[in-house]
Image: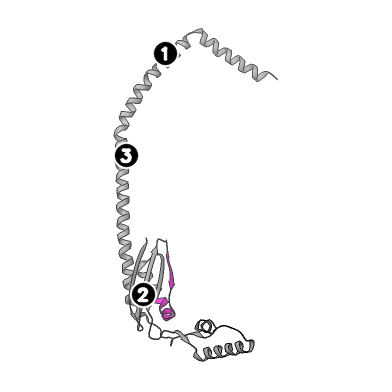
Amino acid sequence: MTGYGSADGKLLGGRLRIEIRTVNHRYFNPQLKLPPELAGVESELRERLRQRLERGHVAVTTRWIEPTESAGGLAVDVERARQVLAAAKDLKRKLKLKGDLDLAFVARQPEVFVFKNGDGAAATWDDVQDLVERAAQEVLVMREREGKALALDLTQRLDTLAAQADKIAARAPQRLTAEYHISWPAVKRWRATARRASSSGSWRRSCCARRTRWARRRTTP
């Protein structure tokens, strides 16, 4: 069944959010998208979700709402910016070019802005277990709510079918009686006609004529 659950909390000095989405599937089929800080808890996370959710296609996404204390970030290489600006001014002077050198020009140059990694702090299973349990519990609550709604809908449909079947069963004898009264006079007329025809010679001569024509067709080359 489909389900959704989420939870967020403090972790490694930042704030992490976990979201779990499930859809119906015969087996347990997890798909985890974890940041580098949670790479070490993937196996425990996978096993715990298998225990709680049992089956279904389970998609888990995590993201940092607030960065960790050790998170990397964007930094400016001031020395590189100075080199770019000095080289550009020298080129402008030598080629006698017009125009101004501004911040936008310097910022577009490679390696002026650089991304620096953090110190590689990693979370443990104890750090994230509470978030996982809370998100998984929300999924189970939603699954149960959806299951009850589905069961109610199926019950109502079955009750409707049962009521229609009862109506058909009640009307069946009446229908058969009505058909009998419509058909029986025609049957009696047919039987009377058949008796009169069988007692007359014309009926026997007709049968003989048909047999003769059939025999001639069989023997004619």
x%, y% of residue 131? 33, 75
Residue drawn 30% across and 64% down? 141
Q: Give the residue at mark 3.
A: 165
Type of the residue with mark 2: Arg
- Please determine whether, in this image, residue 216 is positioned above or below residue 37: above
- Please tell me in which quadrant of the rendered image residue 83 appears: bottom right
- Please determine whether, in this image, residue 76 is positioned above or below residue 54: below
Count of marks placed on residues: 3
For marks 1 and 2 on the same chain, the one whose residue lies earlier in the sequence: 2
- Please tell me in which quadrant of the rendered image residue 189 appears: top left
Single out the mark in the foreground, 3 or 1.
3
Residue drawn 35% across and 25% down? 179
For marks 3 and 1 on the same chain, the one whose residue lies earlier in the sequence: 3
Q: Give the residue at mark 1.
A: 192
Residue 17 is marked as 2
Residue drawn 57% across and 12% down? 208
Quarter occupied by the N terminus: bottom left
x%, y% of residue 119? 43, 88
Q: CA distance from mark 3 to mark 1?
A: 40 Å
Range of the magenta residues?
Answer: 26-44
- Please determine whether, in this image, residue 82 is positioned above or below residue 187: below
Single out the mark in the foreground, 2 or 3.
2
Quarter occupied by the C terminus: top right
